[in-house]
Image (tube, helix red, strand yellow):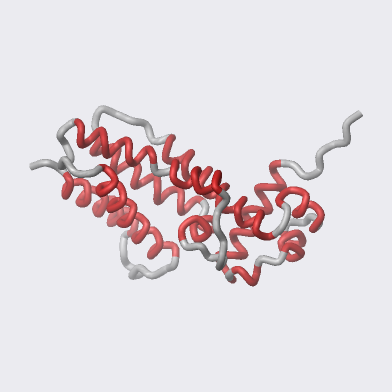
Amino acid sequence: MARPRTHDEALRLRLLDRAGELLSADGPKALSLRKLAADAGTSTTAVYSLFGGKQDLVNALYTEGFRRFGNRMRAVPRTDDPVEDFVRLGLAYRESALAAPQLYSIMFTRVVPGFEPAPEAAELARDGLLPLLDTVRAAIEAGQFADVAPETVAVSAWGLVHGLVSLELTGNLPRAFDVAASYEAALRAHARGWQVR
């Protein structure tokens, strides 16, 4: 009879979320595997069993962040209006960041000095933006967006949403600022800027 699994997916996700919280709140020095295990109510053996060492744990955090992000971006349905799809992908980007802020800094700021994602994790990160690139291509092919390199539009959109989300997550927006409404208005203005007149 097989031994029951004690280091299951629920524990793996709990450890990843807590590790992300530690990194986001207190930086890389806070990521002690012993503290992480204690915070998650498990043993350091479980952490090593599930992830290996600290670098493997950080790679798992990076991978999990982009897995969730990619799932959310791919879940945005494509319609016959690529410009509206473009805006909705921008909204999904913010939703993804707000749903897992503890992973956002690992994904986009390299909060751990010297960390380089494993090749498969880096590929997963690149793939997360494919829905945006495909939508931009569709808008260009439909004659709705200017005929420029799709990557130019996609990267400029990414810069806009990343900047706004980063300001929001770090609490650097004015108190009275209506983040959700202003964010969507900025997305729509950005889309209009690329539209053919």
Which residue does the image show at 26% across and 49% down from the upper left? Answer: 152
Task: Using the image, determine if residue 2 lies above or below residue 175.
Answer: above
- In this rendering, the answer to whether 57 lies above or below 5 is below
Q: Which residue appears at 38% of the width and 70% of the height? A: 172
Position of residue 28 relative to residue 188, above or below, is: below
Q: Residue at x 20, y 36 (%)?
A: 140
Q: Position of residue 196 (x, y in %)?
A: 11, 41
Q: Quadrant of the N terminus?
A: top right
Q: Quadrant of the C terminus?
A: top left
Residue 39 placement: quadrant: bottom right
Q: Nearer the viewer, residue 122 or 44?
A: 122
| Residue nearest the observer in this picture, 15 or 137 | 137
Q: Quadrant of residue 25?
A: bottom right
Where is residue 49? Give x, y as percent.
78, 49
Q: Can you give x and y, in whole percent of width and height, for residue 86 in the image? A: 29, 41
**Relative to residue 21, is residue 130 drawn left or right?**
left
Q: Residue furthest left?
A: 197
**Is residue 99 shown left or right of residue 152?**
right
Q: How many marks?
A: 0
Q: Quadrant of residue 166?
A: bottom left
Q: Is residue 89 left or right of residue 16?
A: left
Furthest residue toward right? 1
Residue shown at the point (73%, 65%) measured from the top left: 35
The location of residue 120, given as percent across then percent down, is 55, 44
